[in-house]
Amino acid sequence: MKIKIDFFSQNTVEAIGAGIYKVSVVKPNGESGVLYVGESVFVLVRCAVHLYELKKDPNYFGFTAKRIENSQITLKFELLEKIENREKRKAREKEIIKEIGKIICQSQVSDRMKGIEAKIEALEDFLNN
């Protein structure tokens, strides 16, 4: 796995608590696409699990074995909002998903991920265009 990882570089301390986060892929030209939006009571821990899953299987976020070795691509984790209350956090997560619209690895109605083939196809389309 040679892609670059930007793991909450702007707000690591804030990401220790509860909130809503975004995982994006950044092309060499700087263009970024949202892979996933999620919420957690422990954002930093949850996103570390995402990284672990990605390391085990690049398809987790739609990467192929070849793409995951491209050091010109960056995987970026960002805290969007800190919200302690679970119900408010869940509701706001759904609002953000709808606001963003096209999310590469995720269905547009919840935090559920697409199937593996759909994730790979969507990420390849984004990276090739």
Image: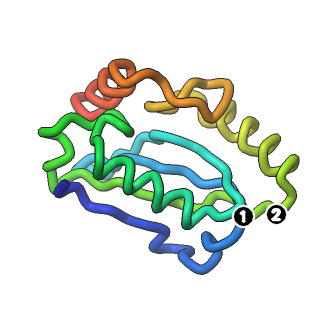
Contact between labelled residues 1 and 2, with CB atoms less than 8 Å apart: yes
Say which amino acid is labelled 2. Answer: Glu
Relative to 115, is 46 on the left or the right? right
Which dot marks residue 84? 2
Q: Which of 81 and 59 is in front in this view?
A: 59
Relative to 94, is 67 on the left or the right? left
Q: What's the distance in space between the residues labelled 2 and 1, CA to CA?
A: 5 Å
Q: In this view, does 21 lie above or below 62?
A: below
Relative to 20, is 120 on the left or the right? left
Q: Which residue is drawn at 60% across and 80% down?
A: 13
Q: In this view, does 45 lie above or below 1?
A: below
Q: Which residue is drawn at 60% across and 36% down?
A: 100
Q: Residue at x 38, y 55 (%)?
A: 52
Q: Which of 11 and 54 is in front in this view?
A: 54
Horizontal and vertical percent for residue 119?
Answer: 38, 26
Q: Would you call the spot at circle 1 few (<14 residues within 10 Å), some (14-19), or many (20 or more)?
A: many
Coloring applied to the structure: rainbow
The tag earlier along the polypeptide, 2 or 1, is 1
Question: Which quadrant holds the N terminus?
Answer: bottom left
Say which amino acid is labelled 1. Answer: Ala
Question: Which quadrant holds the C terminus?
Answer: top left
Horizontal and vertical percent for residue 121?
Answer: 31, 21
Q: Is mark 2 on a helix, strand or loop?
A: loop
Which dot marks residue 18? 1
Res 33 → quadrant = top left
Q: What element carries label 1?
A: loop
Horizontal and vertical percent for residue 24?
Answer: 43, 48
Looking at the rendered structure, the number of numbered marks drawn on it comes to 2
